[in-house]
Amino acid sequence: MTITRTDLAELAVFAAVARHRSFSKAALELGVSASALSHSLKGLERRLGVRLLNRSTRAVVPTDAGQRLLTQLLPTLNQLEEALDELTHHSDEPVGRLKICAPRAAIQELLVPVLIDYLVRYPRMQVEVVELELMPRLIEDGYDAAIFYGDLLPKEMIAVPLGPQQRYLVVGSPTYLGARGAPAHPSELSQHDCIGYRLTPHHHYRWAFAADGKLLEIEVSGPLTTSTPALYLGAAEAGLGLAYCQEDEVREALAQGRLVSVLDDWSPSFAGFNLFYPSRHQLGSGLRALIDMLKAYHQPR
């Protein structure tokens, strides 16, 4: 059969919906409504005479025929996208919009030294930076990329390392430790008040420790749970409990004696900040140029 422009568009729609197994997520990726995607898929199935997707209120799953088509289709679409990316890479300067989110520490450490120069170099780009301490839902929330901690890499994301490894410490005030004593083993944290860290609205971060090359994760509880550094560090200094944080965050407080670190022999180092984006298919020329500048500035020479 002769392939038309409509066929190509609808095949791309099918691939997006089948990859995400969701009309809403595919719609966000493609920048159209979910109802438009559903209409397009019905037209493709009608012309081909075969059902490609099984739909329910809870899930969208490829049929056997749909899975076979997807397996054959993805390499071709990938080649087309790579060819277009190559053309874009060698074309004129990037033009468009980027929406990026990151915690305040990542913005100050990574974006501030680079972003102004980026906008001067590429005046046709518009960038929105959102300060966000919680791990975002990139596609659902409309972000092109996020900068977050590398050990927390979400599924189906590409990560670009941008900084050195970070060591995590457990700290408490001299007053708290004098009254409650210092834990000698991570398992003793169950006997202490701990300042919880919230990774996402639905994910309470467990404290991780290194033990004989193995990872030990501890569920903690206490008077406060937050994703804001000023709050968990302030609570620790006020003697409300122990906090788990990056060494860089508490270096000054430790030097001045406002906080004391415990469990140092168990304190691990994890990947530092990474830039995440949904897949290489989302890597437009504007984001690619920003990644190149971030890597050139921050990665070891």
Image: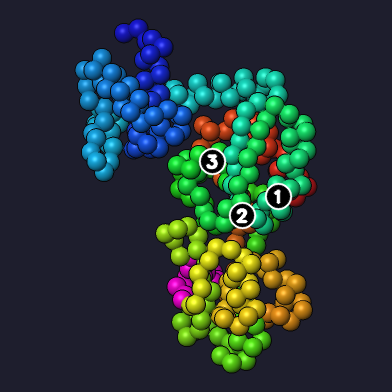
Residue numbers of the magenta segment: 205-221
Q: Is the magenta stretch mostly helix, strand or loop?
A: strand
User: Disc 3 or 2, which lies upstream in sequence?
Assistant: 2
| Amino acid type of the residue tagged 3 in the rendering | Tyr
**Location of mark 2 (residue):** 103
Nearer the viewer's eye, disc 1 or disc 2?
Answer: 2
Q: Residue at x 64, y 88 (%)?
A: 175
| Amino acid type of the residue tagged 1 in the rendering | Leu
Compute the Cα span from label 3 to label 2.
14 Å
Q: What element carries label 2?
A: loop
| Amino acid type of the residue tagged 2 in the rendering | Pro
**Location of mark 3 (residue):** 143
* Residue 256 counted in the magenta span: no
Compute the Cα span from label 1 to label 2.
10 Å
Q: Which residue lies furthest to the top in this view?
A: 2
Nearer to us in this view, 188 or 75: 188
Q: Which mark is residue 62?
A: none
Residue 144 x %, y % = 55, 38
Q: Residue 110 carries which label?
A: 1
Answer whether residue 215 is visible to the viewer in this image: no
